[in-house]
Amino acid sequence: MAPPPIPAAPDKLPTARLKVPAGFNIEVYAAGMANARSLALGDKGTVFVGSRLVDKVYAIVNKDGKREVKVLASGLYRPNGVAFKDGTLYIAELSKISKIEKVEDNLDNPPKPTVIFDKLPKDEAHGWKFIAIGPDNKLYAPVGQPGNNVLNDDEHGLIRRMNLDGSGAEVIARGVRHTVGFDWHPQTKQLYFTDNGRDWMSEDVPEDELNRITKVGEHFGAPFCLQGNIVDPEFGWGKSCDEYTAPVGLLGPHSAALGMRFYTGNMFPKTYTNVAIIARHGSWNRSRKVGGDVVIAKLNKDGTMKSMEPFLTGFLEDNKYIGRPVDVLQMKDGSLLVSDDYNGAVYRITHGKPKTAGK
């Protein structure tokens, strides 16, 4: 289901139909950004928004108590991934990663992005990137499998990391079909990532995965082993799932689990501390749609998933989507942003009494 060609007008957004747990509130943070996807936060409060189907990266700027959306860069090719560190914005396109230095000082007249890494494959299938900067001050970038379920070469189905100037690239995980979201656990500093399972095997398997990297070079199974316990009917001959690192949790069949971040803020109740908040974009080829929501994954002491609970719902009505969540981002005040590429908008979730005029 393709998103509408133009973003929804603010008064046409489905905010009133969206549901959050008791004590939480949801509002429109910014609208009018076609295909709003990955989110990154600048030091001065600017929210950067990537896109996949259009050529633009946006900046949501707070000015005199009002928010405005600027086009920061255009003419890019699938600039889905955005990451920010020390004044510099990193942008991942289909086959390259570039940067804009001192970006928040030049929002009105930003320089063109400078390429730092251009050795990424050009495959369209699963070619769009999510990127993030780890506690080790390195930039992490995945490359998905170049098809639904394929025996890929060494340049695909992986996560690699590199220095912030693009040097020293190394592969840290393989057997990754397509991750579009990852974050580091606040305490263990281990990298957790969502991974989308293959299509066209059945409606109910395989499920999307939540994975965790415990050592460099782990193999997470794709395309040989699915969801940690199913040998792939096509490529799994002679293989055992015991040969691969199993997921720490399952996130639903064809749910398209994308962006995920650990919650470390103080605004939400204590029970939310260190939970993984995961945006599920929703299934595209399942007769009964699943996903199209934001869930929270609570972890056991050993780092595996204990439970998955709904957090933001209402995007799915009568088996049709009225919005598709892509990424989540914690703000400095502890509120949470959620991007919606279907409506070209970003929502903000807060906890506590909503502020009303005159109080």
Image: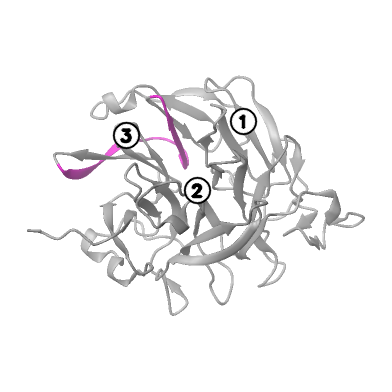
User: Which residue is denoted by mark 1 in the rendering?
Assistant: 161
The vertical placement of 318 against 340, above or below, is below
Q: How many marks?
A: 3
Q: Position of residue 310 (x, y in %)?
A: 48, 67
Q: Earlier in the sequence, mark 2 or mark 3?
A: 3
Q: Nearer the viewer, mark 1 or mark 3?
A: 1
Give the residue type that dot 1 points to: Arg
Q: Which mark is residue 348?
A: none
The vertical placement of 257 against 109, above or below, is below
**Labels 1 & 3 near each other (Cβ < 8 A):** no
Classify residue 61 by image quadrant.
Answer: top left
Q: Position of residue 304 (x, y in %)?
A: 66, 55
Q: Which residues are magenta?
A: 65-86
Residue reaching furthest bottom? 318
User: Which residue is denoted by mark 2 in the rendering?
Assistant: 262
Q: Nearer the viewer, mark 2 or mark 1?
A: 2
Q: Position of residue 122 (x, y in %)?
A: 60, 37
Within 10 angstroms of label 3, few (less than 14), some, or many (20 or more) residues?
A: many
Q: Earlier in the sequence, mark 2 or mark 1?
A: 1
Disc 2 and disc 1: Cα gap in Å? 20 Å
**Labels 2 & 3 near each other (Cβ < 8 A):** no
Q: Earlier in the sequence, mark 1 or mark 3?
A: 3
Q: As rendered, which of 26 and 166 lies closer to the eye?
A: 26
Membership of 102 in magenta stretch: no
Query: At 69% across and 66% down in the image, what residue appears?
Result: 200
User: Which residue is denoted by mark 3 in the rendering?
Assistant: 72
Quarter of the rendering occupied by the C terminus? bottom left
Give the residue type that dot 2 points to: Phe
Q: As rendered, which of 160 and 356 lies closer to the eye?
A: 356
Left or right of 108 on screen, residue 186: right
